[in-house]
Image (cartoon, rainbow, N blue to C red):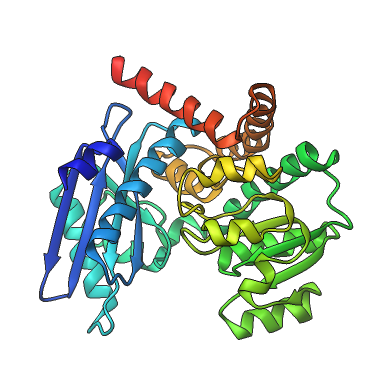
C-alpha cells in the first residue's frame, strides 16, 4: 500500500466505512502546499479493492495536475465511494460521507464526480461545509461541455488546419449530462454526429433532436472519423482499442481516459493527436471550485476561455519537441507542483 502511495505521490490515504449506511470509501490526498485537496467523489461499484485503490490514487494525482494547470488554490484528491448492489438509502450513505469529510476539518473538499450528482452533494452539505457543487450553485455540466468544446476547436485547428467544425465527422462516446450538452453544441456547429450510450432513451433523443447516427460502443470507437470525443469510461482506451482507432484526434470529457500512460506515446506515434484529459476536462471543475471560493461569474468566463489557448500552446510545444502533448502537459503540471512544494 505504501509503495502505491509513493509511486503516485500521495501524502495520505483514508479508508472509511459506516456499517449502518453501507458506506465504504477510499480517499486519496496529494501533498497540500497549494491548499486543501479538491476531491471528486465517484460513486461506482468495485469488485477488486486493489484496483479501486490504484484508480483512486491515479485520480488524485490527475486532480493535482488539473488544479495546478488551472491555477486553482487546491491540491489534488479523490474519493471512491463503493456503490453496493443493494443500499437501503443512498441519501444516508452520502450523509455518512459528509460526516467523514467534516471530521477531516477542511483538508478535503468533496465535489461530484462519476456516478454522483449535485443532489448527492446536497446530502454531504447537511453535515459539512467542505463540499462544492451543490444544487443551489447550478448544474456544472454545461460549463464542462463549453470547456471541452473549446478544446475540440483547438484540436481541429492543430490537427486539421481549421477550427471550423462544420462537415467534420465527430464520434461522441457517452451521453451523460455533459456528453449530451457537448453533443448538442457539436450538432449546432454542423458536424456529422455519431453517438453511443448505454441509455436507449438518450440514443433515441439524439437521433430525433440532434440528427445523430447511433452505433454500438465498440463499433463507434473503431469507426472512421475526424474526432473521437469520449465522454464516459475511465480507462476506456486500452491497447486493443487504441490499435483499432481510425480517427485523426481524440478530445473528450473523461478523466483517466487511457488505461496505461504509455498509450499517449503510442497515439502520437500513430499520428493521432490526443488532448490530455486533465488539461481540457476542467470546465465543470472550474464552475464548482470558483463557486466554492466565492468568485464572480466573470472569473469563470475568463478561465473557460483559457482552456483552448492553453491547449494550443501545449500542442505547439509537443510538435517542437517531437513528443506527445501529454508529456508536455505533465511536465508543466509537475513544474508547478514542484514550485509550490519549494515555497
Location of residue 334 with respect to 95 vertically, above or below:
above
Residue nearer the viewer, 234 or 205? 234
Q: Residue at x 30, y 21 (%)?
A: 341
In the rendered image, the quadrant that contains the C terminus is: top left
In the rendering, at what x and y percent does residue 74 appear? 35, 35
Q: Horizontal and vertical percent for residue 134? A: 40, 58
Q: Decide which of 123, 317 is in the foreground and name it.
A: 317
Q: How many marks?
A: 0
Which residue is painted at 28% across and 35% down in the image? Answer: 9
> Left or right of 47: which side holds 251?
right
Residue positioned most to the right: 167
Query: Residue 225 at what x, y percent from top left?
Result: 78, 59
Can residue 125 be seen here? The reply is no
Q: Residue at x 67, y 80 (%)?
A: 203
Residue reaching furthest left?
19
Which corner quadrant of the image does residue 304 belong to? top right
Residue 335 drawn above or below residue 224: above
- Residue 138 seen in render: yes
Quarter of the image holding residue 118? bottom left
Q: Where, by quadrant of the figure, is residue 154 drawn?
A: top right
Q: Residue at x 83, y 51 (%)?
A: 165
Q: Closer to the camera, 36 or 129?
A: 36
Q: Is residue 209 above or below residue 169?
A: below
Percent from the top left, x then y, of residue 258?
50, 52
Question: Is 298 situated left or right of 278 in this image?
Answer: right
Amino acid at each position: 500500500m505504501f509503495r502505491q502511495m509513493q509511486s503516485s505521490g500521495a501524502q495520505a490515504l483514508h479508508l472509511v466505512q459506516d456499517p449502518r449506511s453501507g458506506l465504504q470509501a477510499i480517499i486519496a490526498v496529494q501533498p497540500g502546499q497549494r491548499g486543501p485537496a479538491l476531491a471528486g467523489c465517484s460513486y461506482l461499484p468495485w469488485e477488486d479493492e486493489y484496483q479501486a485503490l490504484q484508480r483512486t490514487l491515479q485520480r488524485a494525482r490527475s486532480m493535482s495536475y488539473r488544479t495546478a494547470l488551472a491555477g486553482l488554490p487546491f491540491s489534488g484528491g479523490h474519493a471512491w465511494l463503493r456503490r453496493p448492489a443493494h443500499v437501503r438509502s443512498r441519501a444516508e450513505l452520502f450523509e455518512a460521507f459528509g460526516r467523514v469529510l467534516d471530521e477531516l476539518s477542511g483538508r478535503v473538499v468533496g465535489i461530484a464526480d462519476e456516478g454522483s450528482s449535485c443532489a448527492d452533494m446536497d446530502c454531504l452539505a447537511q453535515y459539512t461545509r467542505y463540499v462544492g457543487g451543490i444544487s443551489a450553485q447550478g448544474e456544472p455540466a454545461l460549463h464542462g461541455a463549453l470547456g471541452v468544446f473549446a478544446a475540440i476547436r483547438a484540436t481541429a485547428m492543430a490537427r486539421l488546419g481549421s477550427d471550423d467544425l462544420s462537415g467534420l465527422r465527430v464520434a461522441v462516446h457517452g451521453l451523460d449530462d455533459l456528453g449530451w450538452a457537448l453533443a448538442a453544441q457539436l450538432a449546432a456547429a454542423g458536424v456529422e454526429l455519431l453517438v453511443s450510450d448505454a441509455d436507449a432513451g438518450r440514443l433515441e433523443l439524439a437521433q430525433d433532436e440532434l440528427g445523430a447516427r447511433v452505433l454500438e460502443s465498440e463499433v463507434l470507437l473503431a469507426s472512421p472519423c475526424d474526432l473521437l470525443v469520449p465522454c464516459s469510461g475511465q480507462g476506456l482506451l486500452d491497447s486493443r482499442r487504441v490499435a483499432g482507432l481510425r480517427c485523426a484526434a481524440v478530445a473528450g470529457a473523461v478523466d483517466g481516459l487511457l488505461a496505461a500512460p504509455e498509450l499517449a506515446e503510442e497515439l502520437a506515434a500513430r499520428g493521432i493527436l490526443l488532448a490530455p484529459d486533465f488539461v481540457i476536462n476542467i470546465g465543470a471543475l472550474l464552475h464548482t471550485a470558483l463557486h466554492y471560493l466565492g468568485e464572480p461569474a466573470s472569473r469563470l468566463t475568463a478561465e473557460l476561455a483559457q482552456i483552448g489557448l492553453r491547449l494550443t500552446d501545449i500542442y505547439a510545444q509537443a510538435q517542437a519537441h517531437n513528443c506527445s502533448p501529454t508529456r508536455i502537459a505533465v511536465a508543466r503540471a509537475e513544474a508547478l507542483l514542484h514550485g509550490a512544494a519549494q515555497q
